[in-house]
């Protein structure tokens, strides 16, 4: 059965908000697996570390499988140490998002996150040779490439995951534009990113929304939505569908995807429900259809 997963929170949410969020996920969300951990900025990690054991315990008691995700960018000594400590863990499972984590993990089993760019069969085969058991594909891969990657992963005995909801990660940088936009440096950011729990919006010179900034990360403005494409993804061999946490009712979002996967909701009904949950935020599936990522390709004209 296709498994529904919840990716790691990308934003700097307060400790209280995180605790409340995961309590609801544990008690109400029909997801099978939950990724935890700080992926974007190591300075945020201390705000959540104290709560992780309790969050993990609650999720596991609710029947959710927990995976810990590593940083996407490792530059400082403390980040190398944190990555090495994470890589040394035996349980829960580890998702690696950076080559430093891959080096530290050695030949012990692990998952590969979307920041590692598993774009083709040769790359996936190499990762499998390093003891990867699972691959999450980058959000910008089009349908034909996903099908090829899924087939290669299946032949190697790997799980394969695709993001089906939430803002796409487009880039990570050594610099923090979020801090710079407020006249601060990365080292003296004063955690200004906490003021933007769904990312800081950027607009074009003619005042149209274009991107979101989240610390060192640049994201799409729209939420990726592959709800209409879930049947094709499953048919192509994708084993896990990932929802990325956003400032929306993620329990309700998960229910929409679960109902669609279980055949309890028609495509039109599920689409209408999801659109009602995201408010004014646009939905996009352009990357999947080989088009500009921000575009929304209607089912009737989809590849």
Image (cartoon, rainbow, N blue to C red):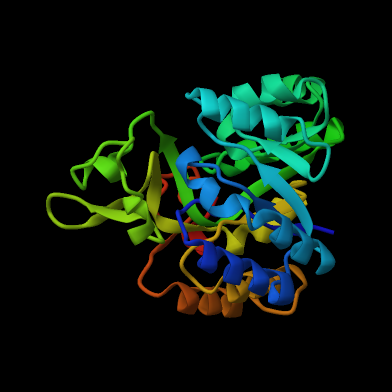
Q: Report how many numbered discs are placed on residues in the image.
A: 0
Residue 27 x/y as whole percent: 73, 76
Residue 169 x/y as whole percent: 47, 44
In the displayed structure, 230 sits above or below 81; it is: below
Residue at position x 78%, y 21% from top?
Answer: 130
Q: Is residue 277 left or right of residue 209?
A: right
The answer to whether any part of residue 118 appears in the image is: no
Q: Is residue 61 left or right of residue 167?
A: right
The answer to whether any part of residue 186 appears in the image is: yes
Residue at position x 69%, y 40% from top?
Answer: 147
Q: Is residue 280 left or right of residue 9?
A: left
Residue 96 x/y as whole percent: 66, 34
Residue at position x 54%, y 43% from top?
Answer: 139
Quarter of the image where one finds residue 269:
bottom right
Quarter of the image where one finds residue 200:
bottom left
Residue at position x 66%, y 59% from top?
Answer: 230
Quadrant location of the N terminus in the rendered image: bottom right
Residue 69 x/y as whole percent: 65, 42
């Amino acid at each position: 059965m296709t498994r529904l997963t919840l990716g790691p929170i990308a934003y700097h949410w307060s400790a209280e908000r995180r605790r409340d969020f995961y309590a609801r996920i544990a008690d109400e969300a029909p997801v099978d697996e939950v990724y935890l951990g700080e992926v974007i900025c190591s300075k945020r990690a201390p705000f959540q570390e104290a709560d992780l054991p309790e969050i993990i315990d609650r999720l596991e008691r609710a029947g959710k499988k927990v995976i810990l995700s590593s940083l996407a960018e490792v530059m400082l000594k403390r980040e190398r140490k944190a990555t090495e400590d994470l890589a040394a863990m035996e349980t829960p499972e580890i998702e690696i998002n950076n080559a430093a984590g891959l080096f530290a993990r050695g030949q012990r089993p692990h998952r590969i996150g979307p920041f590692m760019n598993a774009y083709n069969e040769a790359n996936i085969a190499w990762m499998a040779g390093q003891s990867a058991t699972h691959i999450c594909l980058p959000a910008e891969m089009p349908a034909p490439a996903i099908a090829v990657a899924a087939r290669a992963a299946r032949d190697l005995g790997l799980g394969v995951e695709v993001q089906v909801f939430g803002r796409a990660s487009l880039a990570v940088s050594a610099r923090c534009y979020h801090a710079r936009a407020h006249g601060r440096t990365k080292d003296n950011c004063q955690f200004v990113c906490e003021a933007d729990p769904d990312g800081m919006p950027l607009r074009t010179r003619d005042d149209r929304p274009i991107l979101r900034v989240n610390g060192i990360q640049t994201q799409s403005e729209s939420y990726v939505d592959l709800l209409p494409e879930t049947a094709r993804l499953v048919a192509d061999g994708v084993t896990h569908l990932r929802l990325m946490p956003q400032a929306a009712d993620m329990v309700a979002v998960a229910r929409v995807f679960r109902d669609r996967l279980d055949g309890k909701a028609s495509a039109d009904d599920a689409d209408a429900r999801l659109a009602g949950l995201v408010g004014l935020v646009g939905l996009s599936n352009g990357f999947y259809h080989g088009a500009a990522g921000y575009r929304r390709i209607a089912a009737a004209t989809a590849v």
